[in-house]
Amino acid sequence: MIHLQTPGTIIGVFPEAIFGSACIRLEEGDRLLFFTDGVVESRNSAGELYGAERMIDFIKENSHLTPNIFVDLLINEVDAFTGKLKAEDDRAVLYIEFVSKMQINVPHGNPPIKAAKGIFKKKL
């Protein structure tokens, strides 16, 4: 597991914002998980954060699942963790699995990725 983090601020708020970038090589079977800070900063009734460690454990235990199942399970876990509390921040998830190498000059065929986005039921 590689944690990619680049410098920057909130996307879309500051027109002149400058963001950092990083580059990695992705191979068949690699997966990317993008999520907003509202996911790991979700709190339960005791005030505990869902947190990075819980997220890492979840990823390690479930990264073999298809993107749709992974995202659904993560949303259910975070919602169960927060109980009846409303979200304090936006929460969004995007999970991408690279299933094959990109083929050049192939107009149709199977896409090289499988992806799933998450929609949390609890609103701000």
Image: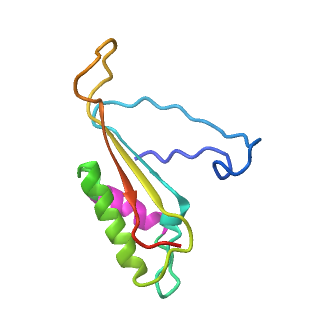
- Left or right of 77 on screen, residue 8: right
Q: Which residues are magenta?
A: 51-61
Numbered marks: total: 0
What residue appears at the point 27 percent right and 52 percent down from the top-left corner? 68
Across and down, in percent, residue 16 comes to: 77, 41
Question: Which residue occupies the extreme right position in the image?
Answer: 16
Q: In the rendered image of this protein, does residue 61 appear above or below residue 44?
A: above
Q: Position of residue 116 (x, y in %)?
A: 33, 49
Identify the residue shown where x is 30% and y is 24%: 101
Position of 60 relative to 80 (above/below): above
Which residue is drawn at the image coordinates 45% and 45% (left, top)? 2
Q: Residue furthest bottom?
A: 46
Residue furthest to the top: 105
The verdict on residue 41 being magenta is: no
- Residue occupying the point 49% across, 79% down: 86
User: Most prominent secondary structure in the magenta stretch?
Assistant: helix
Residue 57 occupies which quadrant of the picture?
Answer: bottom left
Residue 73 pos. (x, y %): 29, 63
| x then y, percent, for residue 13 | 69, 51
- Rendering quarter of residue 59: bottom left
* Placement of 49 over or under 91, stated as above or below: below
**Magenta span has 56?**
yes
Seen in the image, is 35 located left or right of residue 71? right
Q: How is the image coloured?
A: rainbow
In the image, residue 101 above or below residue 77 = above
